[in-house]
Image (cartoon, grey):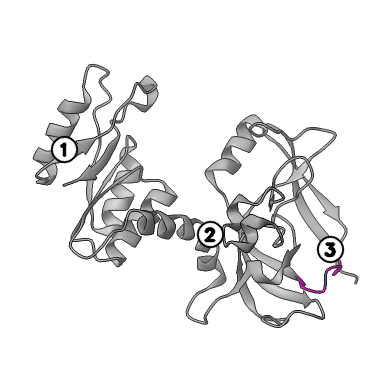
Amino acid sequence: MSETNPSCFLYGPEDARFGDRPIPQIEDPHDVIVKIAYTGVCGSDVHFWTEGGFARKVSEGHPLVMGHEASGVIYKAGPAVSSLEPGDRVAIEPGFSCKSCTYCKSGRYNLCQKMKFAADPPSTHGTLSRYFKIPEDFAYRIPDSVSLEEAVLVEPLSVAVHGVRLADVRPGHIVIVQGAGAVGYLTAATAWAYGAKQVVITDVNANKLEFAEKGLKCQAYKPQSNSASTPEQEAARLKQETGLSMVLMLSWNAPESNHQPNLVSIL
């Protein structure tokens, strides 16, 4: 039986349908085709599901295959591919730059004006399909100690590692992570790995805090949702509950549904 490429298309808010797409073909000799094993669900995917997108939205006339956090196995490799071969297990970097502009050549390819990102309307399809084509240098071989299921977290983990590096976290530092979602959880874990002596994670969602507290053995803090509570009062309560000596805050008027003071740094 010939291979097919079943894919999950989003046509609009809460309107997902399965359909078949042509199996991608090697056109650039440096491309590889990945047989997708797992695709994660990002917070942005949830927005697409509920709202159909952001500035550019999917539509009945231009449905989109969703997904950008993915892992899989190399199915085919172009004739010029030197770093990968069929059968290699890989994690995917979902943004593909032109590799020839000034930004790309200076190492800042994230600023490439010709960047193509998986699951970006109207026509750049994502990884919720059986086969997905990608340049070889955006597919990373994973070690035997990492499963394909775990490798699907490499992309959000890279966000956490980048943030911890920018914050210059070092052994002995005290770190507050604001937000206990997937990236917040991974950021807290990365801070531990970089040698932080104390990690506090905050969120307005008690279930997320409980999950982070159990999994990371860090301190959890839930700001009060009372709109009368000021950032100064929340900082005082945070210090009392966690034993921190000082809280440096940056705050602004936030929606009442997200009344979480913006705690930036601990001294």
Tell me where residue 207 sits by quadrant: top left
| Disc 1: which residue | 238
Q: CA distance from mark 2 to mark 3?
A: 23 Å
Q: Are marks 1 and 3 in contact (CB under 8 Å)?
A: no
123 relative to 37, above or below? above
Tell me the kind of residue under disc 3. Answer: Pro
- Mark 2 or mark 3: whose residue is earlier in sequence: 3
- The magenta stretch spans which residues? 23-31
Q: Are marks 2 and 1 in contact (CB under 8 Å)?
A: no
- Residue closest to the eye, 117 or 149: 117
Name the residue furthest right. Answer: 2
Marking on residue 200:
none
Q: Secondary structure at mark 1?
A: helix
Q: Secondary structure at mark 2?
A: helix
Name the residue at 70% across, 33% down: 56
| Disc 3: which residue | 24
Tell me the kind of residue under disc 1. Answer: Leu
Tell me where residue 27 sits by quadrant: bottom right
| Disc 2: which residue | 155
- Residue closest to the eye, 190 or 43: 190
Tell me the kind of residue under disc 2. Answer: Glu
